[in-house]
Amino acid sequence: MLTEDRVGHYPAFRDFFVRTFSLNSEGLSRPGYVRAPSGMTYALVFIGRSGEPFPDGIEVYAVPSALEPLDDAKVDSDLWALLRWMIDGVGGEWRVEDLDATGRLYQLSAAGPG
């Protein structure tokens, strides 16, 4: 559903995932699942590359119940909620309000009314 090729472009993002999913101590022994507001589960797949701190990338996959088709509007809302969760967890200069404002600028329905 979503891919970030280089999590380390902003080290605080990498630190967020390491901290949230105990990647330094647990490594990949536990899956990185999150439940979104719609109730659907998403799998976070952490990518490692030689010579780069782990994780270097992340992929987000939907895990629907059985073979149900995905509702695009719900997926968009869920991904937006996951982005807000990440931004809030990372902290720093980039805030949830900034993400929402950017989404409204690009007229993304998941960003809410402008």
Image: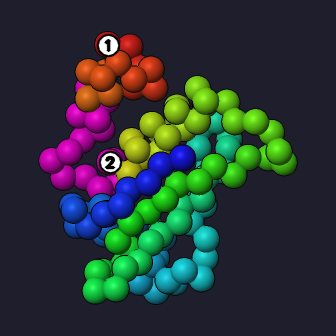
Determine the image quadrant of residue 104.
Answer: top left
Q: Residue at x 32, y 13 (%)?
A: 114
Residue drawn where x is 41% and y is 78% of the image: 48
Task: Classify residue 30 as left or right of residue 96.
Answer: right
Circle on res. 48: none
Q: Is residue 59 above or below residue 85?
A: below
Find the magenta span and give its range: 87-101
Q: Is residue 70 magenta?
A: no
The residue identified by callout 2 is 87
> Is residue 32 positioned above or below 26 on the image?
above
In the image, 82 versus 52, the foreground residue is 52
Residue at the right extreme? 66
Residue 2 image point, x, y percent: 47, 49
Residue under the image location 30 percent in, 80 percent down: 53
Mark before the other along the chain sequence, 2 or 1: 2
Instruction: Identify residue for label 1.
Output: 114
Element assignment for label 2: helix
